[in-house]
Amino acid sequence: MTDARFEAEYGESWDAERRALAGPLVVEEARRRHAAGEPYAVLLGTAGRPRVLLEVEGRKDEIAGWCFDGEVRRAWLFEFRVLGPDRMALLRMAEWHYADADRPEFDATSPCCLTTFDGGGGPVTQPIGAPEAQFRTLESFERWAEPPAFAAWAPLAVFMLGLPPQRERHRVVGPADREYPTPRSAPEPRSRPEPAPGPATPTAFVPPGCYSQEPFWRGHAPEVVVETRPVGLLRMPTGHLVAAGPGTLDDVEAFGVAVPRGHHPVTLVVSWFVDAPDIVMGAGCRIDVKDAPVVSWEQALCPGQDPGTLCEGSYFGVRAEAGMLCFFDAEALPGLAELTADRDEPRGVWGELCRTVERDGSAEMVDPATGTNVLAFPIGWGDEVYPVWIGRDAEGDVACVLADGLVLEDATYLGPVE
């Protein structure tokens, strides 16, 4: 396509049942809404065919973009968030493959794929019903764009449609003096699928007791017991806290929020099934730095991690290794990285650390150069990425830091253990 003339029409919203704009707007009203941050929709077409729908939510700094298939069904979703006057991030992309012209939008039997971005900005795809290779793939650099000025929709539409990014060859013209053809069928619309929700607050900051947990795990009864176990004192000479898998200490950095210097007690939160007490899960691990109630939570972020680039339910996290995480002060990083470099040696320090955690439930290792210690503990369901939270008291001071194993996401408190 050497010259894509995107014809623009504006409306209050998109009518999924009619597959058309609802509440048509003149250009001047759409421009006013854009400047005021009020919601509106833009329909872009070429040669009389609807191609792209943009739903602009200025006050939320969000733009939801859709691409249509030949039946004017929404088949691609691009969700953007404006982070500044010159910076916009793609939060996620979804794609649906409809087998025939009669399939409704977001048909549950149609193959689909959700693409999000991990803490390092790399794309993470979740295909359902078809191989990943059949869906569009993204590169890390493709998630960044400039926010479009009003009526300058062409570059965004070009990206969404996968056209060659030759912006001078694409332009937007005014609303057409005709209506788009009505689709031959308009089945009842369905809600678009959402990604699996993530925690808005820690799931492991709960009192000890008996809980009912859904779903059941490997056929066990749903009742679990939650209890706490002391891990030890974490020595923090600088206050710059690091959380990492024990085998990745050569490529980590401290969180941006420091904790008070000193020696802080670390407590492991564990859960075990009533009908299988030998199966013990690391639900979370907490560093208490101030004896005060927690009134608010925030994600622990490393430099360069922008929470504005996350879609709802997502989080920056720390990847466990061998089912373990470690807490330590950044002063120990060089020495600890050298100590654990023998991970391929069964009788090395790293191997002994793993065996100790498996046997005793936690382990301590000391950096001989600085005297700073590392506390290792089991976490969650295995080698996944887990969020770390900072809890603040009513004065805004850091009261605790909690690594959340996401084991108790669906747990309901039943009462104390009898």
Image (cartoon, rainbow, N blue to C red):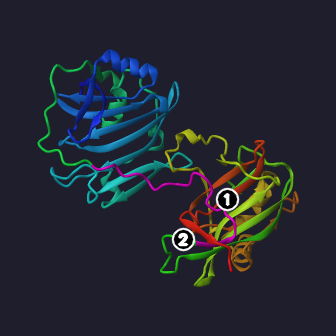
Magenta highlight: main SS = loop
Q: Residue at x 58, y 62 (%)?
A: 406
In the rendered image, residue 85, in percent from the top left (x then y), is placed at 52, 24
Please check the rendered image and state whether residue 204 is part of the magenta-colored stretch, yes or no. Answer: yes
Per the image, the residue denoted by label 2 is: 213
In the rendered image, residue 340, in percent from the top left (x then y), is placed at 73, 65
Q: Looking at the image, which is closer to me, 101 or 250? A: 101
Name which residue type carries label 2.
Gln
Q: Secondary structure at mark 2?
A: strand
Q: Looking at the image, which is closer to me, 64 or 172? A: 64
Cα distance in 3D space between marks 1 and 2: 20 Å
Per the image, the residue denoted by label 1 is: 403
Contact between marks 1 and 2 (CB within 8 A): the answer is no
Q: Residue at x 67, y 59 (%)?
A: 403
Q: Is residue 371 left or right of residue 175?
A: right
Name which residue type carries label 1.
Ala
- Quarter holding the C terminus? bottom right
Q: Secondary structure at mark 1?
A: strand
Please check the rendered image and state whether residue 182 is part of the magenta-colored stretch, yes or no. Answer: no
Label 2 environment density (alpha carbons within 10 Å; few <14, some 14–19, many ≥20): many
Q: Residue at x 40, y 21 (%)?
A: 33
Q: Is residue 385 left or right of residue 167?
A: right
Q: Looking at the image, which is closer to me, 336 or 394? A: 394
Q: Earlier in the sequence, mark 1 or mark 2?
A: 2
In the rendered image, residue 225, in percent from the top left (x then y), is placed at 64, 75
Question: Compared to 25, does 113 lie above or below?
Answer: below
Q: Which residues are magenta?
A: 190-211
In the rendered image, residue 48, in percent from the top left (x then y), is placed at 16, 29
